[in-house]
C-alpha cells in the first residue's frame, strides 16, 4: 500500500515524524507544508494507528477549534488538518479489512493462463493457453479461493507456477497468482501478499493438477 498526502504547515513536525517512523515512510517539507508518504504498512501498524486516528478524526470534525491530543504532542485542530486525518482513516480501515475477504468472481467470458518455468517440478514455460469453454467449470474448482491460506508463503519453497487470467463479461480481467503448495490445494492470490486455498477435485496436488490441465488444453489432449 502506498499513499502520498500533503497537509498544511500547522501540523506539528513531531506528529509527522512519529507516524512516519511507524509506517516506514519518507517525510518531506514543501512550500505548502509537510508531505508524508507511506509504504507497505503492516497489519500490526494498521491496527495500532486505527483507533488513534479514528478518535482524532472524530474530534477534528466535532470540535475543530479546540486543542486535542495528537501523536506525540498537543496540536491545534484546524480545518486544514481534516482531510489528512480523514484520508488516513480511510486508508487504514481499507487495509485492515481487505486481507480477510475471500474474492469472488464476476460473470466470466473466458479463462486464459501463463505457465512459468519451474525446473524443480519439471514445468516448462508457456506464454499463453486458453481454457476451453467446456472445461471452465472443472478448471474453476481448482482456482476459486475457498478460505484464507494459513501457511506462510515462501518464494523459494512455494513456487510461482502460473498466472490465471479471468476475463469478465464487462471487459475487466482478474489476475490470479498460483503457487505450488505440495500435496495441498494450490495457493492463489490477487496481489502476491494475501493468499487463499484453491479447491480440490480429488487429485492430491492442486497446483500440479492446474498445470496438467493447462498443458492438456495447449496440446488439445484433454
Image: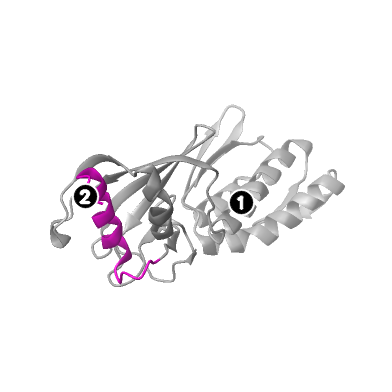
- Numbered range of the magenta stretch: 200-222
Residue 204 is left or right of residue 197, and the answer is left
Whether residue 34 is situated above or below residue 85 in the rendered picture: above
x, y (%) of residue 28? 51, 37
Secondary-structure class at tag 1: helix
Residue 35: in magenta span = no
Write down the quadrant of residue 93 in the picture. bottom right
Q: Can residue 63 be seen?
A: no
x, y (%) of residue 206? 32, 64
Q: Residue at x 32, y 44 (%)?
A: 113
x, y (%) of residue 176? 40, 49
Mark 1 touches mark 2? (CB < 8 Å): no
Q: Residue at x 52, y 48 (%)?
A: 105
- Residue beneath disc 1: 94
Residue 209: in magenta span = yes
Query: Of the residues under marks 1 and 2, which one precedes in the sequence?
Result: 1
Distance from the alpha carbon under mark 1 to that under mark 2: 45 Å
Residue 58 is left or right of residue 10, and the answer is right
Residue 117 is left or right of residue 15, and the answer is left
Query: Badge 2: few (under 14), some or many (20 or more) residues near its Cα, within 10 Å?
Result: few
- Residue beneath disc 2: 221
**Colour convention:** one colour
Secondary-structure class at tag 2: loop
Whether residue 25 is situated above or below residue 72 in the rendered picture: above
Amino acid at each position: 500500500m502506498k499513499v502520498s498526502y500533503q497537509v498544511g504547515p500547522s501540523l506539528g513536525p513531531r506528529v509527522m515524524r512519529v507516524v512516519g517512523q511507524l509506517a516506514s515512510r519518507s517525510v518531506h517539507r514543501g512550500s505548502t507544508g509537510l508531505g508524508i508518504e507511506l509504504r507497505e504498512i503492516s497489519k500490526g501498524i494498521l491496527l495500532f494507528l486505527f483507533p488513534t486516528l479514528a478518535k482524532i478524526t472524530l474530534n477534528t470534525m466535532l470540535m475543530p477549534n479546540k486543542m486535542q491530543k495528537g501523536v506525540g504532542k498537543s496540536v491545534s485542530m484546524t480545518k486544514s488538518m481534516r482531510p489528512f486525518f480523514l484520508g488516513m482513516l480511510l486508508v487504514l480501515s481499507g487495509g485492515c479489512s481487505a486481507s480477510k475477504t475471500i474474492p469472488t468472481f464476476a460473470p466470466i467470458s473466458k479463462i486464459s493462463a501463463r505457465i512459468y518455468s519451474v525446473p524443480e517440478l519439471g514445468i516448462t514455460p508457456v506464454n499463453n493457453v486458453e481454457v476451453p469453454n467446456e472445461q471452465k467449470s472443472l478448471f474453476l474448482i481448482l482456482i476459486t479461493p475457498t478460505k484464507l491460506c494459513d501457511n506462510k508463503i515462501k518464494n523459494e519453497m512455494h513456487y510461482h507456477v502460473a498466472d490465471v487470467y479471468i476475463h469478465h463479461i464487462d471487459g475487466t480481467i482478474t489476475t490470479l497468482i498460483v503457487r505450488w503448495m505440495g500435496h495441498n490445494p494450490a495457493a492463489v492470490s490477487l496481489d502476491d501478499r494475501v493468499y487463499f486455498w484453491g479447491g480440490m477435485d480429488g487429485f492430491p496436488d492442486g497446483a500440479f493438477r492446474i498445470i496438467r490441465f493447462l498443458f492438456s488444453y495447449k496440446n488439445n489432449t484433454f
